[in-house]
């Protein structure tokens, strides 16, 4: 079984492609969690995979919280993850491995897959050029074919591109980022908004509602930026940080 969290579609694409390679069930983890304390039924010797994006050199906070709440019918002897990232992962593998072991589960493996960048909420961060996004997507399938062979063989390994200064990024910058730079209060809709409700529809946290035809953000935000990237009029803004920046989703790419 493969569980995924995805805002703009990168991790969903990876999970679905891997699911076809392995012949595994693929489910969005937030739907399971939102259903309450439902126990996930695992077959004997069935592996349990997680696919999620890297947020500030670590797993998304919402994924770690979902992992804490997740209940399974029987422990899997092979729990693995794939993290999608625009570049490097920092110590994402260590953070997720500890979260798995805290539940008493057996950690098996971890992998990273480079996908088009979608983070745009700080100076200097923007979506990739079309050419670079195409190269990353072309390389994805070959990378996943290798990963699928490792998972089938139950290899115990970690193959993530940590990049430079991974400890500094994951254990110093990441906590500061999560504390000070993930507030949804800066989200707003410009006058270009057409009240279509797309932002509310795509939000995996169900954190957006329409009031008098305009989106209003609650405080239960994962900072996945689905609302920003899926807006058909590019009307969603994050303060002044997103001004002049691009959008990317795999739907738009298709």
Image (cartoon, grey):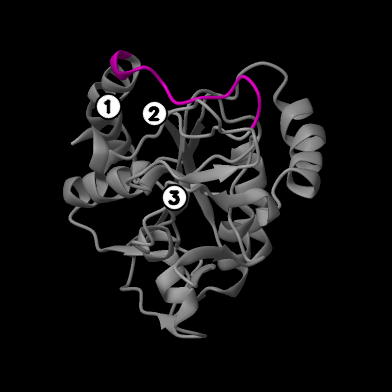
Q: Which quarter of the figure is the C terminus placed in?
A: top left
Predominant secondary structure, magenta span: loop
| Quadrant placement of the N terminus | bottom left
Helix, strand or loop for disc 2: loop
Question: Compared with residue 220, is residue 169 higher up or lower down, i.e. above or below?
Answer: above
Do callouts 2 and 1 mark residues in contact (Cβ within 8 Å)? Answer: yes
Q: Which of the pair 221/98 is nearer the observer?
A: 221
Q: Quadrant of residue 149?
A: top left
**Residue in front for this viewpoint, 126 or 51:** 126
**Above or below 45: residue 34:** below
Q: Which residues are magenta?
A: 122-131
Q: Which mark is residue 116?
A: 2
Q: Earlier in the sequence, mark 2 or mark 1?
A: 2
Mark nearest the camera among 2 and 3 is 3
Tell me the CA gap for discs 2 and 1: 7 Å
Q: Residue 68 lies in what quarter of the image?
A: bottom right
Q: Which residue is mark 1?
A: 137
């Amino acid at each position: 079984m493969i569980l995924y969290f995805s805002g703009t579609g990168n991790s969903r694409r990876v999970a679905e492609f891997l699911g076809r390679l392995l012949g595994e069930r693929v489910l969005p983890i937030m739907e399971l969690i939102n259903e309450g304390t439902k126990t996930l039924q695992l077959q004997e010797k069935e592996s349990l995979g997680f696919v999620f994006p890297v947020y500030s050199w670590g797993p998304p906070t919402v994924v770690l919280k979902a992992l804490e709440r997740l209940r399974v019918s029987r422990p899997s002897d092979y729990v693995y993850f794939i993290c999608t990232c625009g570049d490097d992962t920092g110590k994402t593998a260590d953070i997720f491995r500890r979260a798995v072991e805290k539940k008493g589960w057996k950690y098996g493996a971890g992998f990273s897959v480079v996908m088009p960048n979608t983070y745009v909420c700080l100076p200097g961060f923007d979506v990739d050029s079309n050419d670079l996004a195409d190269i990353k997507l072309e390389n994805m399938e070959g990378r996943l074919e290798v990963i699928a062979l490792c998972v089938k063989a139950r290899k115990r390994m970690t193959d993530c591109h940590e990049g430079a200064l991974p400890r500094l990024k994951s254990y110093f910058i990441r906590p500061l980022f999560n504390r000070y730079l993930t507030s949804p209060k800066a989200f707003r809709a410009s006058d270009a908004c057409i009240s279509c409700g797309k932002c509310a529809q795509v939000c995996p946290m169900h954190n957006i509602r329409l009031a008098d035809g305009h989106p209003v953000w609650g405080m239960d935000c994962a900072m996945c930026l689905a609302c920003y990237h899926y807006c058909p009029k590019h009307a969603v803004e994050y303060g002044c940080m997103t001004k002049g920046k691009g959008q990317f989703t795999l739907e738009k790419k298709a």
